[in-house]
Image: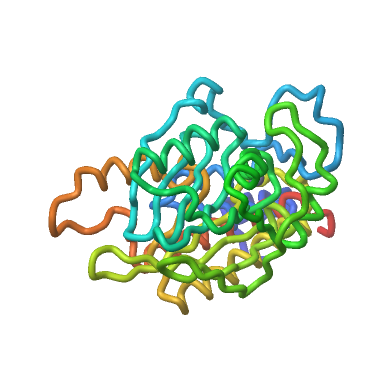
Amino acid sequence: MRLIPFAAVSTALLLLATPLAAQDAQAHAEAGLAAAADFPGFADLCDLDMHIRDVNAPRDRSTRGHDHKGGDRKPRAEARDPLPPMQVFDNLWFVGNRSVSAWLYGSADGYVLIDSLNTAEEAERDVLGGMEKLGLDPTAIRMILVTHAHGDHFGGATFLSEKLGVPIAMSEADWQLAERTPPHPRFGAAPERGQVVAEGQRIPTGNGTLEVMITPGHTPGTISPILPLSDGGQTHKAVLWGGAGFNFGPDAGIFRDYAEAAAMARNRAKAEGVDVVLSNHVRRDGSDRLMAELAERGPDAPHPFVMGPRGLALFTVLEQCALAQAARFDTAD
Ligand SMILES: [Zn+2]
């Protein structure tokens, strides 16, 4: 009989002792973290010890003391801390805060507002107040596009819709989620059903046409818009990943849907030449840091939000971390 080296035997024993699903989870998490070098705000998605809550399950939230955001939630005091509104591209403005982002897309001839912040108060202060500081006219907003039916994105929508007389748009799946979401002590009631937007729908604005991409996972009908951008003479294209957190319960099937959507988005982004990736939380995409860099940008310096093809790695982070969590909760093995 041939002698087998001790190290080989112990490795084999270790592999035998580790269930296949756990090895699979570890491998995907390592792939996700390797891709996350430029995306530190998304790396926690690959945390295999993360507690996975389910904020989409209908329940009485009146007795719950916290909202739906991820494990490393910022203290409330910081969440209330405003960020200065800013023009980020010729046709894109940030009008959010440190807790949640709202992006204004288009021109004075017509804007789409993407998301509406936590509450009416924040929408009034940061969206309307922000536009006023920037010298922009809120009556040029044509639509409030809500990326997904969670309170931190729709909280200010009813107020803005009524104030400006404009529709609220979401995907069909997320209108259904909104309809089964009870009023929340912080975000209030979900908006009344408004416009439905569908995969591939093109929404014209005063400058640039936004395209709806639906990326199920974070919610059943999360919208991740594709935004053609301009910066002086240069054109760019962004994907705004509409819902990042893993807070839909320990359901391997949903994690697989999420991974599939991320892979689809990567292919799509590659085909479209996407070179900017955005989120609707600054703790994810680091927009606060990038806007600070943009404010200091020299005349011929590159735009800090423009990553080029490196930006596509975000979709690998999202896909691999979702596959890692899927394997963690896969009961088939
Ligand atoms: Zn959410």
Horizontally, is 249 left or right of 147 in the view?
Answer: right
Residue 27 in sight from this viewpoint: no
Looking at the image, residue 121 lies above or below residue 210? above
Residue 153: x and y in percent read 62, 44
- Name which residue lies at 49% across and 51% down: 139
Horizontally, is 136 left or right of 111 in the view?
Answer: left
Looking at the image, residue 31 lies above or below residue 100? below
- Name which residue lies at 55% across and 37% down: 123
Quarter where residue 272 is shown:
bottom left
From this viewpoint, which residue is outermost toward the left? 299
Residue in front for this viewpoint, 85 or 99? 85
Quarter where residue 221 is shown:
bottom right
Residue 268: x and y in percent read 53, 75
Residue 173: x and y in percent read 77, 60
- Determine the quadrant in which ligand 1 lies: top right
Looking at the rendered image, the quarter that the N terminus falls into is: bottom right
Looking at the rendered image, the quarter that the C terminus falls into is: bottom right
- Name which residue lies at 86% across and 31% down: 60
Residue in front for this viewpoint, 287 or 265? 287
Residue 68: x and y in percent read 68, 36
Residue 271 in sight from this viewpoint: yes
